[in-house]
Image: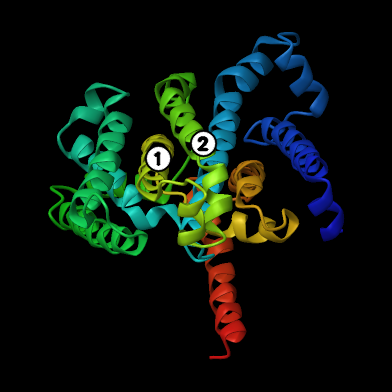
Amino acid sequence: MIAFFTRHPFALHALLAIILLVAAFGALAVGQVPLSLAQVWQGLRGLGDGLERVIVWDIRLPRVILAILGGAVLGMAGAAMQGFLRNPLADPGLLGVTNGAALGAVIAIYGGFAATSTHSLPIFAMIGALLAVALACVLAGLRSSPYSLILAGIAISSLFGAGVALALNLAPNPFAAMEVVFWLMGSLEGRSGAEIILVLPFLLLGVGLMLSCGRALNALSLGNQTASSLGISLPSVQGRLIAGIALSVGAITSVAGSIGFVGLVVPHLLRPLVGSQPSRLLSVSALGGAVLVLLADIAVRAIPTSGMELRLGVVTALVGAPFFLWLLFHERKREGL
């Protein structure tokens, strides 16, 4: 099976696309008001009663689209990071994007901006994410090595995380702190088409920048010296990758909160199916990430709870954390430690 997909990459793309389509229809059917697939199809076509159309078009479809976009971005960003660093443990959150967005969201909530405008919170979160990555780049230096950049990203991420913790500690009332905590857990509940329109340009630009590095990632798999001899400019590749990850991951984090482990789990699971070309892994991980986040969001709505629904970030962490531990054990076993 692995050899078949390695020789026929289109087949893997087609399989993941079919799974994604089926999951999307399932996500449109699942919720507090269950719908049959026939009702979903009628609602999508604008037929059926008014309630079905409202549920499908105004409530569930924006959520499904954001789940697909978010999963695709996180999966592709994880594949890009792992290909650039040649390390399966790399994750886009290492650059400080998540904590930067979190601090921006905290400022929007505590400053009262989120209460006055629905767009304020994602805008502040996006600015925080871009600021965190920019500070990491400045701290590491313009021509830094990838590992220096990661260390700088960890430092900035810790600093911004401390800012979030300080805000929670000094919260004037428990409701403000609870709002921040819920945002940090990640969720697509209540999202609308307005959020999609707001972040879509940043997502497309970020994805385009990451895809432009596909050939360079293939060359880097042979080593930095070989890549340089093939005409690959490492500073240029690093700059495009960082900008692409910051724009795309920062944008989706700004509207969905923190959704962890997708960028770590998906590329590692799909890497054996694409052979030795990291460029193939970018698009495959985008499809795989979209499938994972969409299935997690279905689980969020399908699992019965006494009150508020589970948070999406909690579900992905419950899946990703055990996988991360297994991955660490596997790496230690491979290295004979």
* Marks 1 and 2, the one that precedes in the sequence: 2
Of the pair 122 and 229, the residue shown nearer to us = 229
Q: How is the image coloured?
A: rainbow
Is residue 212 at least partly visible in the picture? yes
Percent x, y of residue 112: 17, 31
- Residue 299 in view (yes/no): no
- Taking the image as shown, residue 72 lies to the left or right of residue 15, namely left
Q: Amino acid at mark 2?
A: Ser
CB-based contact (under 8 Å), mark 1 and mark 2: yes
Q: Secondary structure at mark 2?
A: loop
Q: Is residue 170 above or below residue 337?
A: above
Where does the N terminus fall, quadrant-wise? bottom right
The numbered disc on residue 212 is 2
Position of residue 71 measured from the top left corner of the image (x, y, whole percent) = 56, 42
The disc at residue 146 is none
In the rendering, at what x and y percent does residue 178 appear? 30, 49
Three-letter residue code for mark 1:
Arg
The crowding category of the residue bearing disc 1, from other C-alpha atoms within 10 Å (few below 14, some 14 to 19, many at least 20), is some
